[in-house]
């Protein structure tokens, strides 16, 4: 089998990372989480009290970021100036900061370059917002994974409940809508379905069903 690439795009909470990790394991290919890279830039800016709406400040901060990514067995470890931040970037604040810095061209340019480099030399499944439209425009298979705001809110609330954290459902829903707005309306490489992507609505599907649906699409196209 020749090398192939699978692009998975869609809004926050649609199931991209859970589904991509499982598919990577089943097909024994590399999983690349591009959101983690924007989160890492966001974390660095938060830690250094950078004004996220000031492009020049963020561009300056970007120069002080050395990002290293290690890929192994469907798992990605990310280092910010030598520190393993794989878990630290998983907060709501880092997600919001990621979405804020993701509007800046210089940030996208730096990260897209890293993403394309990482995709070379092996078969990959990569998830994000602009993979099918921009990072891997010639991806073998493109999926746009969607789910309703209501369902994505429920998933997030469930996650927080399992962590024993307090939450306000209305606030979570508001944050999801804001993030969608931010990601769909930015100037550079906004979130949108690539023309040749297949859209899947996972609102009424669990992770296993979504994985199976995507595997069927992959198997129709290539011999895996
Ligand atoms: O990567 P993305 O933000 O698109 O979503 P995710 O992190 O994979 O999934 C967000 C949450 O929804 C996780 O807690 C998943 O376990 C859950 N989920 C679900 O309940 N049903 C699905 N079909 C997909 C995800
Ligand atoms: O896990 P969740 O879906 O909440 O977000 P993520 O995939 O970790 O991405 C965090 C933020 O980074 C997104 O809201 C986008 O603004 C940005 N991002 C992007 O602009 N382009 C990508 N390829 C991936 C993420």
Image (tube, grey):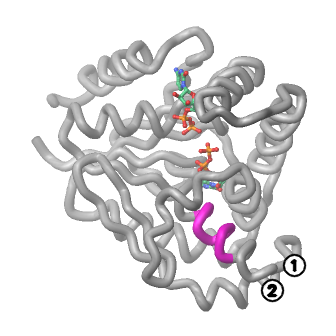
Mark 2 Cβ and ligand 2 under 8 Å apart:
no
The residue beneath circle 2 is: 57
Query: For the point 24% across and 23% down, which residue is it?
Result: 219
Residue 72 visible within the image: yes
Q: Position of residue 166 (x, y in %)?
A: 77, 34
Q: Give the range drawn in magenta.
A: 38-44
How would you rate the neighbour count of disc 2 (Cα within 10 Å): few for under 14, some for 14-19, many for 20 or more? some
Residue farthest to the front? 164
How many numbered discs sit on the rendered protein?
2
Q: In which quarter of the image is the N terminus?
A: top left
Give the numbered dot on residue 54.
1
Query: For the point 74% across and 26% down, which residue is it?
Result: 153
Query: For the point 85% across and 30% down, which residue is it?
Result: 168
Q: Position of residue 213 (x, y in %)?
A: 39, 16
How would you rate the neighbour count of disc 1 (Cα within 10 Å): few for under 14, some for 14-19, many for 20 or more? few
- Of helix, strand and loop, which one carries label 2? helix
Say if the magenta span includes residue 41.
yes
Mark 1 Cβ and ligand 2 under 8 Å apart:
no
Query: For the point 38% across and 36% down, which residue is it?
Result: 141
Residue farthest to the left? 1
Q: Are marks 1 and 2 in contact (CB under 8 Å)?
A: yes
């Amino acid at each position: 089998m020749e090398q192939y690439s699978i692009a998975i795009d869609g809004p926050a909470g649609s199931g991209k990372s859970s589904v991509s990790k499982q598919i990577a394991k089943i097909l024994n290919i590399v999983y690349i989480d591009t959101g983690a890279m924007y989160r890492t830039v966001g974390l660095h800016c938060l830690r250094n009290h950078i004004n996220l709406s000031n492009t020049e400040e963020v561009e300056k901060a970007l120069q002080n970021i050395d990002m290293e990514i290690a890929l192994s067995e469907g798992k990605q470890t990310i280092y910010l100036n030598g520190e393993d931040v794989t878990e630290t970037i998983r907060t709501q604040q880092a997600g919001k900061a990621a979405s804020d810095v993701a509007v800046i061209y210089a940030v996208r340019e730096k990260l897209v370059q890293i993403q394309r480099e990482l995709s070379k030399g092996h078969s990959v499944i990569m998830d994000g917002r602009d993979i099918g439209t921009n990072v891997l425009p010639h991806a073998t298979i493109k999926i746009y994974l969607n789910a309703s705001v209501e369902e994505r809110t429920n998933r997030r609330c469930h996650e927080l409940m399992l962590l024993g954290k307090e939450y306000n459902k209305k606030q979570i829903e508001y944050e999801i809508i804001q993030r969608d707005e931010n990601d769909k309306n930015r100037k550079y490489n906004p979130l949108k379905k690539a023309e040749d992507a297949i859209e899947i609505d996972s609102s009424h599907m669990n992770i296993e069903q979504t994985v199976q649906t995507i595997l069927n699409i992959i198997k129709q196209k290539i011999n895996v």
